[in-house]
Image (cartoon, helix red, strand yellow):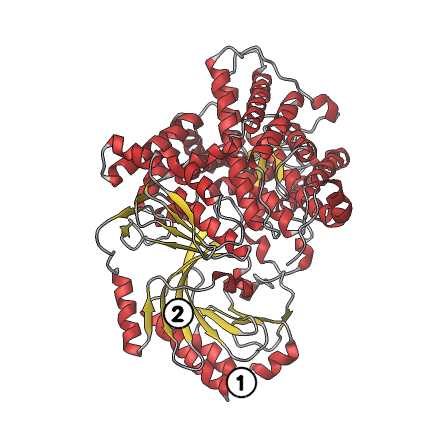
Amino acid sequence: MEITPKKGFKGLIENWQSDMIAAVSVALIALPLSIGIALAADVPAMAGIFSAIVGGVVTTLYRGGHVSVNGPAKGVIAVILLGLAAMDDGTGQEFNYVLAAIVISGGLQVVLGLLKLGRFADIFHSSVIHGILAAIGIYIFAKQILVALGSNSDSSNGAIQNLADSVLYLPNANPFVVIISLVGLLLLLFHSKISYRFFHLLPTPMWVIALSIPFVYGFNFFEDHIVSFFGKTYEVGPALLLDMPDSIWKSVLHPNFGMIDTIEFWTTTLSILVITSIESLAIAKAVDKIDPYKRKTDLNKDLTGIGLSTMVAGCIGGLPIIAVIIRSTVNVHNGAKTKWSNMYQGLLLLIFILVLSPILGKVPLCAFAILLVYAGFKLASPAVFKQIYSHGIEQLIFFIGTMVLTLYTNLLIGLFGGLLLALVSHMFLARVSIPQFFKMIFNSGSNLVMKPDGSYCLKIRGIANFLGLIKINNLVAQIPAGANATIDLSESRLVGTTVLEDLYDFQKIQQNTGGNIKIKGLDKHISSTNHKLATKIKVDAVEPLNRRQNKLKEMAESYGWDFQVEPVEDLEYFKSFYFFKSRPIEAESNCISDPNKDLPIKLIDVTFEEGVDIFPDEYKTTIGLLKLPFSIPKFIIEKKDFLDKVLPISEHWDIDYSVYNNPPNDYIVKVSDIEAMDAFLTDKLKVLIEISGLHHLESNGQAILIFSNNFVLAQAKDYIKMIQFIENFKSIIKQ
């Protein structure tokens, strides 16, 4: 295990090179996104830049995190827009009023951190937070789609009205703007698939910006003129470009506290406080999960640091500071080791804006708009709805209820309305009286004991939902790192999604430190779906097998194999396969296995995450696993899709494997050792792979991983296909 990097100035001296390299990548992403967020919030572009610089430089001086990156984020757009509309008194000072609200919200954030109240962010139900973010996504999409079409959104209109306006505007969309937007959208969709390393020298947002500039010259956006296109005329000119100030320092704006005695001011202030605090703390915990050194963020200190930065940003015309998941993830993946990488990216942004300001003035507004259209869609895509539904129908109700309330009222009403909806639903599901319900939350009798063998037993009783999460987490925190423990939920009347999320996260943390956590006692609970995070309600009987599980059991019996609904696999083992290095497996179920042969086969349903957002996409698929008693070459064999056939692209451009030039037809092959692969990949194996129709085949050197489709559960015919393939594969490699 690698040695944990030192803190403070010792860490700066030892790790400045790796931190600086990571900071360059982060700064290149932060530059266009910070500008885009400011424009989407209907404030000067420099407001986003100021926020990103302050988030990097100031936050680093007092923070509780290690590798997270701070700056403006998508979550503040809706809050700022609503604040501008609410405090528009006709004087043109509405942004100055909002800056005052930002300063005070930062001060309140500092107070919350000093009072060590960061942990209270845990009480906010996860599906409710999803709903808030989805509403923000719709809001961003609706506001920016018109800009991407060559028009302007009306900040006074609601999101739904702007969506309707964009549909009506389509026939009149400016084709010269639309072309640039479409090029940007294609880059966002397919950049990760392009195999040429040249296209990965810059992050995707910078490519969107860079490739828009030649179109600006080609269409001559620098002069106002009329251009005909298919019989229609369109206005083209500087109004379609980013308006950069002649002097950066003249862009500094100061807060105006003239509306501090109004309801509108305090509604804006509290909205900023709640959204930035919850999102920052949620992201801090998400970044801890991907920190290779498994360090934990001091949430209270981080809250204080972000509050101080927000105050500074508000004083000079910047937006609220938030921990940003995309930039933090890029920071980690590029080798950042200490908090100083955050400062470096802030300083680099300052240099970039001083040097690149004339170039940025040549970037069309639609290039920034399409970045945010894509981001907004990701927050409220059908995949998000599907993921929430997989957690249970009740979660979908909380999610949609919160989203609708937020869209038609404001963020505060949406948040607390969603929490009330979740609470009432839990009361109904628990089927106990209201006094008994709250007694089972706050006086549940949950306790932690240490057993004679040094392990721990945590028994959680009563109602284990978001209101009781702080108490539960306090008990969990008493279990030492690396210790073995059993978490018993058998006496819980109801176990909510938010509690289950935290318990499974703790399980993974303990595994990383050498401990083992067993979560048991849910065999007499039911839920609306089979997802491990679905709300569990206690019943008197074991949940019967569903239709698919019965079929799998019958299939296993026909082969004389075993069937387990809840198998026990080492989930960490799957990380030895390239496919699962960036797609962590969250759960396993429904295992068909043949343990009696010399080369045992296992077919398992697994749930894995795809993406780097706070709430990444979740998929379920069925994998085949064959562990071998001998070594074979490491390789990846993946069936070509349409794009792979027409373009020189590959999903695995970044893996340190060589392209194998003699692969089976219709397959892409990458290997660690070409000579070893030549000896291993016989003609018989090639033919077997070609006729199998399998989507993915991979070796980690000691085992084979296969699946017929990346993102769906296998049907009976798929099981037969995988079993036949593995049996034939075994017979060939034995020869």
- Amino acid type of disc 2? Leu
Could you say which quadrant of the image residue 633 lies in?
bottom right
Q: Which is nearer the eye, 624 or 181?
A: 624
Q: Which is nearer the eye, 700 or 118?
A: 118
Categorize mark 2 by other alpha carbons within 10 Å: few (<14), some (14-19), many (20+): many
Quadrant where the image shows the N terminus: bottom right
Q: Mark 1 points at which residue?
A: 683
Could you say which quadrant of the image residue 360 lies in?
top right
Q: Which is nearer the eye, 197 or 472?
A: 472
In the depicted structure, whether residue 254 falls above or below residue 577: above
- Give the number of the disc on residue 326: none
Q: Name the residue under label 2.
A: 603
Question: Residue 655: where, in percent of width, then height?
Answer: 62, 63
In the depicted structure, whether residue 323 falls above or below residue 729: above
Mark toward the viewer: 1 or 2: 2
Q: Which of marks 1 and 2 is nearer the N terminus?
A: 2
